[in-house]
Amino acid sequence: MRFIKLELLLFVIVAVFGITALVAQQPAAQTGAEPKGWTTQEDHQNMMSQLGIRKLRPGPSGRENAPNPANYDESLANPFPDLPEVLKLKNGKKVTNAKMWWTQRRPEIVEDFEREVLGRIPPNVPMVTWKVTNTSEAKVGAYPVVGKQLVGHVDNSAYPAINVDIQMILVTPADAKKPVPVMMMFGFGSLPGTTPPAGRGGRGFGPPPGSDPPATEQLIADGWGYAYVNPGSIQADNGAGLTKGIIGLVNKGQPRKPDDWGSLRAWGWGASRALDYFETDKDVDAKRVGIEGVSRYGKAALVTMAFDTRFAVVLVGSSGEGGAKLHRRNFGEAVENLTGSGEYHWMAGNFLKYGAAEADFGSMNAGDIPVDAHQLIALCAPRLTFISYGVPEKGDAKWLDQQGSFMAAVAAGPVFRLLGAKGLGTSDDYKTEKMPPVNVGLLKGQLAWRQHDGGHTDGPNWKYFIPWADKFLKHKPPKR
């Protein structure tokens, strides 16, 4: 009997230790799993499979002699001429006051963009801890500045296999007597007075030498600060990176679900975390922080402004499809370009449905998208929103559809007015309004437009943007 009791005790001890060891191993196996090492094509195909899509329509080509060239015939540009109404609830009721906008209509639009177009930021995104890693004292143009190099480390304790460190440079006037407004810009820069790392020469902001000073010099001269936020340090600009970066960190290296965020929202999330830091920095007036970007980062700047109402002003440079351009326009870049493997990572997976030729649900196109770019611009209201383009002759290609972006700005005007701001000063008839001549700005309201005579840059518009922003933000340049 004694032997049986000892044997039973030994069995219990072994069993307990075995269960404990098994439990202890479970989290390690989960947190230590390698991220999916998929190619862009594999990730794109996975999302198509999740959505039941068998075939996508190919996007048009920017080359006129290609088999599927983009349309540049204005008479064919509006196959879906009627835009979703920006001031009508889904139940058909008209939005007649600001309270209805903020509590009913705006949340409806946000939900449609998050579910179908841009994706949702998950509720469990880890915290970011900012650290100043280097400082400098130098001059930008003729004026002394203080530069800070910062890293925002994203807590990856739940999944150490992926590390995300947001890179940022903040530069403010050294002689400022109080906190200054700051323009945050998507791009990579270096501290003033230091040598840029090899192969990373920073971002060109201005037109060719001999004309306007760079935007950074214009901002410092006017008493602003500026910041660079490196989008690549937040999320890669390709589909293969979707199981890495901040999106991959939150998903523990696994592929997205159809309504998960894409790179545009991830970059916007990173900009918002930078603004969190600004709210703690005594040199920055965090109530007067702007966001800026050109091309794909113009899209990201508009998305950032639309979703984070703490930003006071945005300069949207040459943003095109996925930015200020109407999805429903058939002119230049199209929805089908955004659903293809080269650009789908900017968007939610669900957006692929609108390029589907054959799928379990049939087929869908741009006319089926529940929202459009005019509503994205409207989400910025009543804050300062400046839409900037150049001219095709200098490299701001027709592909971007400047007219379609102007139409979107016109159609957003009623929301700005409803909220007590001024629109472009045009009628609300986006179907008939035409763009002003090149170099003629519509700058009298909180919603502004200007097409400059340069190329794929917002450089020539900074000298108009800065005084326009000063006026509405009540910022007075320092007397020097």
Image (cartoon, rainbow, N blue to C red):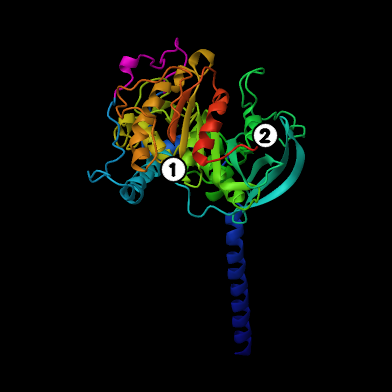
Query: Horizontal and vertical percent for residue 287?
Result: 54, 47
Q: Secondary structure at mark 1?
A: loop
Measuring 41% from the left and 41% from the top, which residue is drawn there? Answer: 381
Q: Main secondary structure of the magenta part?
A: loop
- Examine the image and state in which quarter residue 240 appears: top right
In the image, farthest residue toward the left:
92
Query: Horizontal and vertical percent for residue 192?
Result: 73, 35
Stretch in magenta? 59-79
Circle nearer the N terminus (2, 1): 1
Please tell me the numbered disc located at residue 284. none
Asked whether residue 372 appears in the rendered view, the answer is no
Query: Horizontal and vertical percent for residue 423?
Result: 38, 33
In the image, farthest residue toward the top:
65
Residue highlighted by disc 1: 119
Identity of the amino acid at label 1?
Gly
Residue 75 painted magenta: yes
Asked whether residue 479 appears in the rendered view, the answer is yes
In the image, farthest residue toward the front:
479
Residue 296 painted magenta: no
- Examine the image and state in which quarter residue 72 appears: top left
Measuring 41% from the left and 36% from the top, which residue is drawn there? Answer: 377
Q: Secondary structure at mark 2?
A: loop
Residue highlighted by disc 2: 189
Alpha carbons under labels 2 and 1: distance apart: 29 Å
Identity of the amino acid at label 2?
Gly
